[in-house]
Amino acid sequence: MKKVYLVFALISIVIFNISAQPHLHIERNLEAARIDGNQSWLSFWDGPAYKGFLWNNQGTMTLGTSDENTAGQLKFVTNHVDRMTINSQGLIGVNTSNPLSLMHIHGDNDILRLSGNQPYLSYYNGLGGYVGYLWNKNLFDIELGTSSNNSTGSLFLRTRGNLGIWMDPDGLVGIRKAPTEALDVSGSIRTDLSVIYATTSTNNYWRIFHGTATSQLCFAFNGDIKSCINSDNADFLTSSDQNLKKNIQEYEQKILPKNQASSILRI
């Protein structure tokens, strides 16, 4: 027993006198140390203050700060650079040591990537209900939507906090307002081509467009021009009498006497 005590005493003296070196240095290519037991752990202290632990909880490995270490953080470091930080409130920072939300990722380029065969992000509410998704559909398409079980949810797009587009559960679309029609707009609508009104049952359609002159507003049914309005003099020309309306001045001047021309009714 005396020899054993002497060995421990010598080891203690050697460890105590090694300056700026690790107190325990194990060099081995195979298993170098073992902590056995189904509830075994390593604990870390700063003097009398319990700071953290590495715990084998029946096969579940837990690394954490202690309940006494209320301001402590967990950091994961590579190449002497903080890569991930979990602060005392449980906020997680990736590439930042000061996370400001539950998951805070800092980076200048490609900071988050979903890859695979049609990956998607799914959204659940606090009640556990599946409410919506952002989906890479059919390899090249992107689909944003509410789930099939979400019968009351809408989609919103906003800029500067203001409502831009509102799509309700029935598929009605509102621009800057709650929709009551298939397309419901609060404000003006502008088109550089034409507006088409079509009926799906008969395939008939009306088209409103600029005429041959930009000052004309014309109406066509199934491709045939029915009437036009001239903005210069507000003449209303129909397909049956456009030539008459254009030539009415010549008709007055050359065919009818002057005293009868004034009695012609203009439509």
Image (spheres, grey):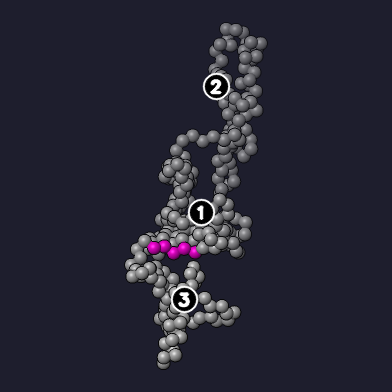
Amino acid under label 2? Ala
- CB atoms of marks 2 and 1 within 8 Å: no
Q: Which residue does the numbered mark 3 point to in the structure image?
A: 15
Separation of residues labelled 2 and 1 (CA atoms): 62 Å
Separation of residues labelled 3 and 2 (CA atoms): 105 Å
Other-residue count near label 3 (Cα within 10 Å), few / some / many at <14 / 14–19 / ≥20: few
- The kind of secondary structure element at disc 3 is helix
Q: Which residue does the numbered mark 2 point to in the structure image?
A: 234
Select label 1 or label 3 by which is in front.
3
- The kind of secondary structure element at disc 2 is loop
Amino acid under label 3? Ile
Amino acid under label 1? His
The image quarter containing residue 113 is bottom right
Other-residue count near label 2 (Cα within 10 Å), few / some / many at <14 / 14–19 / ≥20: few
**Circle nearer the N terminus (2, 1):** 1
Q: Which residues are magenta?
A: 72-76
